[in-house]
Image (tube, rainbow, N blue to C red):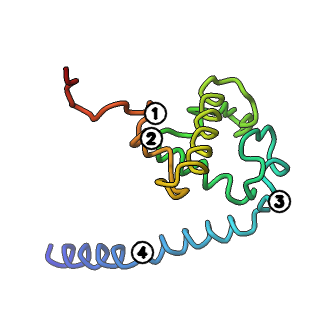
Amino acid sequence: MKTTIHMRNKIALALALAAPVILIGISGLTRVDAQLAPQPTGPAGKAFKNIKVLKDLPAEKLIPTMHAWNDSLGVKCDFCHTVDANHKGYERDDKPTKNAARGMVTMLMDLNKHQKALGGRGTCFMCHHGKPEPELRPEGGAERR
């Protein structure tokens, strides 16, 4: 009985020590695969289909920019984009949220350009606070009369 417990402890220790090594190896493979995948180059308007607002953004910055918007609104890609089972369809304009996002991005670009107080650092998070709809007043705040 004591030998079985001792053996289980050794196995548990071995697994605990091996897990980080395995995870590092797997993440390394993922990074290598991502580095081998062809990366889009040039302006986003030429590298991707149906780019209307961010045409001049470098193509390699488009996806990270979209991910930042996901975080700012607390949504995933399919909130604005049509994503088919084969991971295609991003260029389609099926959802009204996509055109609303274009309008919001245009507004934010204008704010960053003309409002010196922002110093060009305005983001979607300023109004959205991680939620799909912008917050118009503080949460839980009562209206004053």
Query: Which residue bears the numbered disc 3?
Result: 42
Q: Residue at x 58, y 48 (%)?
A: 114
Most extreme residue toward the right, as rendered? 46
Which image quadrant for residue 93?
top right
In the displayed structure, 138 sits above or below 111; it is above
Q: Residues within 10 Å of mark 3 (few under 14, many from 20)?
A: few
Q: Disc 2, disc 1: CB below 8 Å?
A: yes
- Which of marks 1 and 2 precedes in the sequence? 2
The answer to whether 145 appears left or right of 42 in the picture is: left
**Considering depth in this image, is 142 or 9 the residue closer to the camera?**
142
Q: Disc 4, disc 3: CB below 8 Å?
A: no
Which image quadrant for residue 79?
top right
Q: Secondary structure at mark 2?
A: loop
Kindly report the distance in space between the C-alpha atoms of the residues bearing marks 1 and 4: 36 Å
Q: Residues within 10 Å of mark 2 (few under 14, many from 20)?
A: some
Query: Which residue bears the numbered disc 2?
Result: 74
Kindly report the distance in space between the C-alpha atoms of the residues bearing marks 3 and 2: 29 Å
Circle 1: residue type: Pro
Q: Position of residue 3 (x, y in %)?
A: 19, 79
Mark 2 or 4, closer to the camera: 2
Q: Residue at x 72, y 41 (%)?
A: 53
Q: Residue at x 48, y 54 (%)?
A: 118
Circle 3: residue type: Gly
Circle 2: residue type: Gly
The answer to whether 83 appears left or right of 119 in the picture is: right
Query: Which residue bears the numbered disc 4?
Result: 20
Q: Secondary structure at mark 3?
A: loop
Query: Which residue bears the numbered disc 1?
Result: 132
Query: Which quarter of the rendering shows the N terminus?
Result: bottom left
Kindly report the distance in space between the C-alpha atoms of the residues bearing marks 2 and 1: 6 Å
Mark 4 or 3, closer to the camera: 3
- Which of marks 1 and 3 precedes in the sequence? 3
